[in-house]
Each structure stands twice: as C-alpha cells, then as structure tokens.
Image (cartoon, helix red, strand yellow):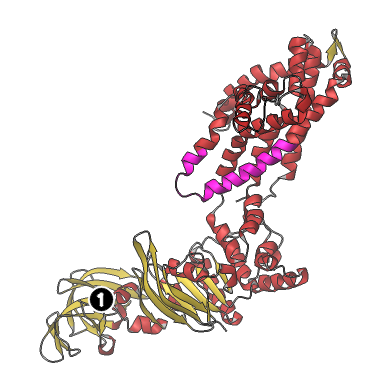
Amino acid sequence: MAEIQIKNVAKNFGGYQALHDIDLTISDQEFMVLLGASGCGKTTLLRIVAGLETATTGEVWINGRRVDHLPPKERGIAMVFQNYAVFPHLTVFENIGFGLRMQKMPNDEVKRRVERCASLMHIEQLLKRYSGELSGGQRQRVAVARALAMEPDVILMDEPLSNLDALLRLEMRAELKGVLADSKTTAIYVTHDQVEAMSLADRISVMHQGRIVQAASPIEVYRNPAAEFVAGFIGNPPMNFLRAEAAGAGKWSVAGQTVDGPAASGPLQYAIRPEDLRLSDQGLPARVKLVEPLGAHLQVTCDVDGTAIRAVLDSDLTLKPGDAIHLAPQPDRVRWFDPNTTKAVQ
Amino acid sequence: MNARLLPYLLILPVTLFLCVFFLYPFILVAQQAFSNGGEASLQNFRDVIGYWKFPISLRNTFLLAIIVVPIQLALSLLMATMVSKMKKGRDLVLYVWTIPLGISDLAAGIIWLAIFEQSGFLNSMLAGVGAVDAPVNFLSYQNTFIVFLAIMLAEIWRATAIMLVIIVAGIGLIPKEYYEAAEVFGASPWKRFVKITLPLLRPSLQTALILRVVLAFEVFAVVAALGGTLFPVLMGEIYSYQFDLQNGGNAAALALIVLGISLAFTLIILRALRVPKGATI
C-alpha cells in the first residue's frame, strides 16, 4: 500500500521557478505518467519525490508518512534512470543485488531475489556479465530488475525507454506494463513521448511550464483536454483550432458556418481532432494544400479561413493540392476553449 | 599514403628519440653493470649488495615509500573529493594546491630546511613563545626520527599534488548518475565512496600510484637537503658511487636494482588495480 501525496510543492533554482504549487495525489498501485516537453519540470518533480532534489516549499507524503526531509533510502522507493546507471564495475548479479547488499540482507535471500527479478526481466543468462558487455536494451532490463529487487512501495522511472531504438522501445514498453502491474507497486513514470504515456498510464499528468495542466485518464486527456496546451500537445497530428465569433445565444460563426456551441461571450477557439473530420458535401470549406499518404490513412493539410487545418481521411481518397473540399466535423467531438484563459469551455 | 603504414610513420620520430636517448644509454648502463674489467660478471652487484650501507639505504627508501605514499594517497583522495564537491573557486583551490609541483625537489628540500634548521623558522617560533630557551638542532644525528619526519613532511608537501591532479581528473570522469543511483539504493556517503568512487577510479589510481611509487624510489634531493648523510637512500648511494667513489660499475648496478624494484611495484599495482574486461565506464 503506497499512496503518494504531493502537496503545494514548488521548486526554485536560483531565481528560476521550475515548479509552481504542484498538488497531486497518486493512489496505491496506480501507474502515473508525468508527460511534458523538455524543461516543463517533470523530471524535477520526480527527483523531489525520489529525494535527489529538495523542494523549495511543499510536502511529499508516501504511505501516510511525510518523507520530504528523509534521505532517498528511507522513502521506500526505487528508481530507474534515463541512462540506466548500471554500475560498470559490478556484474549484473551485483547490480541487481546492490540495494539488497546495502540493507545487509543475507546472501541466500539476495540470491533468491536477484534470480527472481532477473528471470522476470529475462536476463538470467547475463548475471555474470559486466555492463560493458551488454546492449542498451539489456542494460535497461538490469536497471528495471535492480529496482524490482528492492520490492519497493514506489517505483520512479525517468524516461527509462528514451535511449532505446524504436522497435526495442515498443517491446520494452509492453513488458514494463506487464511486470509493473504484477509487482503491485505504485509507479511514477516521466516521459516526453505521448504514445508511451497513453499506452502505459492509468492516469497522465500533463505538465507545462512547471504546472500540472491536467491530470486524468489517457482517454480523458485525449478526448477532453482541459486546456489548449493539452489539446495541442497530445495527438499526432494535434487538435485543430479555428477562431469562433459569437453569433447569437449558443450560436457561433466558424469559417463562415454557423454552429451550435456553449453559451458564453466573446470569441472562442473551436477545436477538433484531425481524425474527427471527414470529407463531405457541406461543412467547413477548405482548400487542400498538402497531401501525405501514410498507408493506413491520408493526412491532408488544408487552408480553412486562413488557418492550416489537418485532417486524417480515408486512404482511398484521391485528393491533390488546390482541390476545394468540405470537411464535416463529428459534432460530439468538437471542443471549445477560451483564448483568454486557454481553459476548456463546456 | 598507405593507411596501414601511416600510424607507424607518425610514431617513428618519438621512437627514434627514445632509442637514442633512453634505450641506448640504458644498454650502456646495463653493460657497465654486468661487466668487470671488460669481462661479463656479477661482481658489481655483489659489491653493491655486500656494502654495509646497502641494507640501511634500502630500508630507508622502503620506509619512506611505505609511509609517505599511503598518506599521500589518502590525502589526495580526500582533497580530490573536496575539490570535486566545490561549486565555486574550484580551479583556484586546485592551482594553489598544485603550486609545490612547480618547485624543484631540491628547492623544496631547502624550504623545509629553512623551517627545521637551528636558525630556522620553527626554532624562532618556539623561542618566541618561550617553549625553548636555546635553539634546538632538530636535524642532527641525535634526532634521526625528526630528520625522518622532516623528510616525510617535505615529500608529502611536495609530491601529493601529482596524485591529486590525476585523481581529480579521474573523479570528473565518473558520471553523476552512478552516485544518484547508489544513493537511491541506500548507500551512505562513505559507502558511495568505497563502492562507487574507488572502484571506478581504478585506472586513475593505477596511474597515480605507479607515478608516485616510482618517484618515491627515486627520492634524492629532499633527503640530501634535509638529512645529508644522516638518512642514506638508494638514489643518494648511486650518486655517491658515481661521483664520490668514481665507481661507474657499482653505480650502474645499483641503478639497475632500483629499476628492478620500480618495475616490480609497477607490475604489482597494475595487477592489484586491474579492471576486468567490460567493466570500464
């Protein structure tokens, strides 16, 4: 049982505010992904939970115990580092058993745990090797096994897959998900890769400029972004935005079309995902600018009322630049944002 | 240009230089050591080893090396750890600590002589605070322990920095992530030093120790300045064979013995601190 509570945590690096008042509760056995572009503070937040960095203000609680003044080893955590940090002078066995040795665990117990974790990560045959004799993927497995061997309450992962090649990353991602679900630990996972975040997370915290913009399930973050930043960050290609002018109560004018919308004043941003647009006789008038056949579908960039809009369309279509088309949005997928607050409007 | 020949061509000048100025004189010395009156013989070695001062100078040299080098190793590790933890002023501290390196060993010996001699700073200070009535002759045959202590201090002061700079460079090569990982997995600062710093520092420790141990067996000028003939060491004996006794054969034989000792220690250090294949950073 390990619930993590981050209360009002802020971090200031000599005048630079890396984190602003972070409040986040991660439930027991939850897989929480901190997602954001580089420099958004996600790694700093993870390191504060780990105890490698001290928060300027705020508290960190793990398992109902305040830990922000404790050294890392007293927090019940284990960590997987971006560059693996597999000790080069120790064999794989001693690497996995490092934390257990530090606890002065008896030899046979160390052996039992190391062998169990090595077999979980499929590296039993590498136990006598040094890290210089391992591939990147194998080192990553050692790093994960070393964290699992601690049988921690919480596993912290700092971009653990970012140094692997694309194919290996897919394989490790699936494996990590399985292993961590079985281990019943609470996990915080930092990444800038949204696909990784979507596929692994129970909940995603999208971070931007030292703040958590939205913390919700992957599908919620995708379907109902809480802010323009989330809408523009998640999804490949990301959400399209068009300017909407008020045209009477609950009516909005978007690219010359009148559509139903929220009852609000002032101009709003009309947002729609590229895959929620389809070719139609009516809808948003668009001029095709770029056609990218991607195999599974056709990615088309159009000009709608002076704004570039991307649409993901059926790959059987034959479109060419210059064509005048109409793009019909799926009505229940349209989202609205207030350009002043950048927050979603219901 | 043939790419396979190019590397050999590039090292040719330095190879020639080493052959002419090191290998050739070395062969001459070896020839001199192993011959007596034009015939091949071990007489020079028998003379040198049988001489009454040989065991004393051998013992003194070893004693100095065995006491000074570990102290220097510990000090340089401590200093290097301190320097690497500094955020500001790191370079300044390092420069100050390495000043003694720029001073010749004879000058270093004379500096410490100025402290310890009868009219030296130590005596003036002791007299000044009223600790002694008359100046004490510290560096006399009655105080051989103080002579040894003075030589030890001068050697530590003079030659610790050579190990320090090598170890500072070595510590700089160890990625910070290893320390963070060790910390997260429960290693105390001391454990991190013993389990991470020391093993990962092996290549630098090898270089530093070999350099320092070889230099320790070559100790000469500092001893000459502070101890004169009170504290005979091997290098001093070679000097006196060559220039006082005009016996080139004996000097060459003793020089080869020192070379043998240095080589043996180099091999021991290489072996003791070797890094297994695949275990490098």
Q: Main secondary structure of the magenta part?
A: helix
**For residue A236, side relative to residue B100 (left or right):** left
Camera-nearest residue between B209 and B63:
B63
Residue B208 in view, yes or no: yes
Asked if the stretch drawn in magenta spans residue A234, the answer is: no
Residue A113: image quadrant is bottom right
Residue A57 sits in which quadrant? bottom left
Does residue B86 show up magenta in the picture?
yes
Q: Assess disc 1: are there few (<14), some (14-19) or many (≥20) residues with their C-alpha within 10 Å of its C-alpha.
A: some
Give the residues drawn in magenta, as a range. Answer: B67-94
Could you tell me the amino acid type at mark 1? Asn
Q: Compared to B85, does A144 lie above or below?
A: below
Q: Which residue occupies the foreground of this view, A108 or B56?
A: B56
Compared to residue B182, the image places residue B160 above or below, namely: above
For the point 14% across and 85% down, which residue is it?
A265
Q: Is residue A32 left or right of residue B122?
A: left
Would you name the residue on which mark 1 appears? A240
Judge from the rendering whether residue B198 lies leftward or rightward of residue A291; answer left or right: right
- Is residue A251 toward the left or the right of residue B172 in the image? left
Image-quadrant location for residue B253: top right
Pointer 1 indicates a residue of which chain?
Answer: A
Whether residue A131 is visible, yes or no, is: no
User: Residue B55's spot in the image, x, y percent?
Assistant: 85, 26
Identify the element where label 1 is drawn: strand
Residue B259 image offset from top left, x and y in percent: 75, 26
Q: Position of residue A203 (x, y in %)?
A: 44, 81
